[in-house]
Image: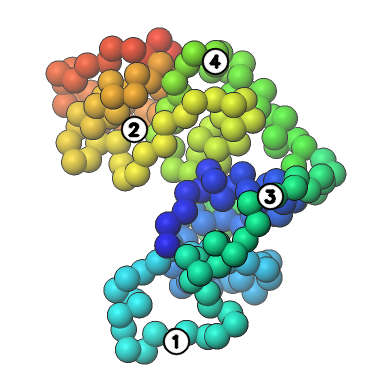
Amino acid sequence: MGFSMEISTKIFFSRGCARPPWAGLRSALGFCTLGIISKWNPSLCLTYANETAMKREDTKWQKERDVWWQDVVPKCSTECDVEWVDAEDPLFLLYTSGSTGKPKGVLHTTGGYMVYTAATFKYAFDYKPSDIYWCTADCGWITGHSYVTYGPLLNGATVVVYEGVPNYPDPGRCWDIVDKYKVTIFYTAPTLVRSLMRDGDEASILFIHAYYAF
């Protein structure tokens, strides 16, 4: 099955659900290794389809627990009422990178986090309705959470979301995306900028009026 973090986040939040992390946790092994499942006891777990794993003879399917997305979704209602929650209710759990020890789960609450990301996106980036915004951060980390998902959604922004990395299959991919979608605000990391500088300035940057490096 396929699903985007932006859509899933919007749905989970509207239903008043606290969403667990999935940065770097592309498999069930990642969740089990960190003890996330046992610690937080989620009521629902969305995961990526693994075609290779599904073809293995020892793949175990547990009836009543495992379901196919395409079998469940058509039966669902198209109406989804918003669940009102308190400012201090949990919004999502995000684990630290673990660079200085075991990853730690950080619980972000609804009101403070959403006010902060909405305000910083609007004023730090000086976003206008006519802008096309692109942040290259991974949605699984806090920058991607804040400035690919929550900040832009809260401001009704037009956002470019892409798959893969911005300099593959070639260094010009970044500017190809900028040119194709007429990006006017570009937010990326100094590491990527240094990498692109080594490749020269052959690619075009036609539309950008604001550039930020985090």
Tell which circle, 3 or 1, labels the residue nearer the N-terminal end.
Answer: 1
Residue type at mark 2 is: Thr
Taking the spot 35% from the left edge, 19% from the top edge, the residue there is 182
Label 4 sits on residue: 129
Name the image quarter holding residue 40: bottom right
Q: Which residue is mark 3?
A: 79
* CA separation in Å, label 1 and label 4: 49 Å
In percent of width and height, residue 173 lies at: 23, 32
- Residue found at the far bottom of this picture: 58
Q: Amino acid at mark 3?
A: Glu
Q: Name the front one of labels 4 and 2.
A: 4
Q: As rendered, which of 11 and 110 lies closer to the eye?
A: 11
Quadrant (top left/top right/bottom left/bottom right) for the N terminus: bottom left
Q: CA distance from mark 1 to mark 2?
A: 42 Å
Task: Tell which residue pokes out farthest to the right in this image.
Answer: 86
**Cβ–Cβ under 8 Å for marks 1 and 4:** no
Question: In the rendering, at what x and y percent does residue 172 appear?
Answer: 20, 29
Secondary structure beneath label 2: helix
Callout 4: 10 Å neighbours few (<14), some, many (20+)?
few
Tell me: 7 left or right of 190. Answer: right
- First of labels 2, 3 by sequence position: 3
Identity of the amino acid at label 4?
Pro
Query: What residue would you read off at disc 2?
Result: 191
Residue ID for mark 1:
60
Alpha carbon separation for disc pair 2 and 3? 44 Å
